[in-house]
Image (cartoon, grey):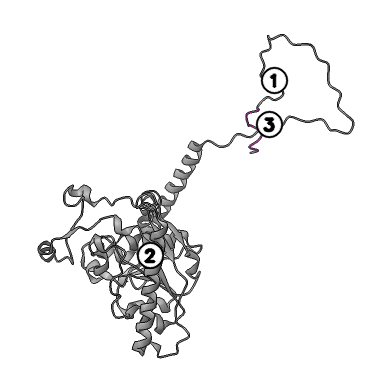
Amino acid sequence: MDPVAGARVIPLHGADRNPASPTRPRGPRPVPAHQPAVEELPLAVAPEPQQERGEDWEQRLGGLLDFIRRRLVGDYEVDEFGFDPDLTDNIIMPPLKPLYEKWFRVETTGIHNIPAEGGALLVANHSGTLPLDATMTAFAVAKEHPANRHLRMLGADLVFKTPLLGALARKSGQTLACNPDAERLLSSGEVVGVWPEGFKGIGKPFKDRYKLQRFGRGGFVSAALNTGVPIIPVSIVGAEEIYPMIGDVKALARLFGFPYFPITPTFPLLGPLGAIPLPSKWYIEFGAPIATDNFGENAAEDPMLVFNLTDQVRETIQQTLYKLLTQRRNVFLG
């Protein structure tokens, strides 16, 4: 159907004047021979936003029904680690979109540094009391990278020991933070994410925000050297402020088997409402890749090389954090 045919025509040349108003009779104006007569064309009216929203909901409903059909007939794949891409893309990722776009208003730079295919190891700073920084990084890689790649995150054993959370983590592509699993994923061409600070980074006091903790013994560097994949430093600003940790009740942490029991300005003072993160403005920068395929076959067995590469990655992230912080004017407005 031609969208112009049914469009509303806007009258031109004073056609909307009051016909009762006195006017002098005018004869037809002669058209010069060198100028063609101008034909009034109907103007197309833009589609109503409500119509676009309706079509969007129809597409979502159709996608959901198709997803249910695939689950019922078993038309989906799960890899050896338990990763379910179909469930991740259709159920786990969509609820994160408003948090990513509207609440934290995440801005990314350097996403092109992640290769379109083949293995890569993303190494990031860790903060925020709860690991939302890892979740937002995974969403950025899946939705903003041209190849829409899945980030296979390495998590602590506590994640997989927690009921429901462990199963959900496996289905979303996470696996235990150990070198054998990391190397298998990297060798198979996956993008792997690691947060070397661990609980020391995510559970540090608010007064130590954006000060990187120790990066462990460099296990992630060994995994990259053994597989020859590039290391991509990732710097995240904004996560430190979502749950400002002003205290740690160690007795309760030991009671529940947690690495820490946080006290924030809103938790436990506001009860369940204290679990709502503060709407800080986020920036995620994916740095230039650090090549690891030019060090030789047994490079991972050289402790000095592993130490130097670990320190290089850590220093790159720290300096980038300082740069991003100097550019940020306000914690919540950016």
Q: CA distance from mark 2 to mark 3?
A: 55 Å
- The x and y percentages for residue 28 are 83, 19
Q: Is 48 positioned to the left or the right of 42 in the image? A: left
**Is residue 74 in view?**
no
Q: Secondary structure at mark 1?
A: loop
Q: CA distance from mark 2 to mark 1?
A: 63 Å
Kindly report which numbered mark, 2 or 1, lies closer to the viewer in this rendering: 2
Q: Is residue 57 above or below residue 85?
A: above
Q: Secondary structure at mark 3?
A: loop
- The x and y percentages for residue 255 are 10, 64
- The x and y percentages for residue 47 are 55, 37
Q: Earlier in the sequence, mark 2 or mark 1?
A: 1
Q: Residues within 10 Å of mark 1 (few under 14, many from 20)?
A: few
Kindly report which numbered mark, 2 or 3, lies closer to the viewer in this rendering: 2
Marks 3 and 2: in contact by CB < 8 Å?
no
Kindly report which numbered mark, 1 or 3, lies closer to the viewer in this rendering: 1
Quadrant (top left, top right, bottom left, bottom right) of the N terminus:
top right
Give the amino acid at mark 3: Pro
Q: Residues within 10 Å of mark 2 (few under 14, many from 20)?
A: many
Magenta stretch: dominant SS? Answer: loop
Q: Which mark is residue 321?
A: 2
Q: Earlier in the sequence, mark 1 or mark 3?
A: 1
Q: Which residues are magenta?
A: 2-9
Q: Which mark is residue 42?
A: 3
Q: Which residue is mark 1?
A: 15
Give the amino acid at mark 1: Ala
Relative depth, front residue between 109 and 180: 109
Q: Is 92 positioned to the left or the right of 162 in the image? A: right
Q: Secondary structure at mark 2?
A: helix
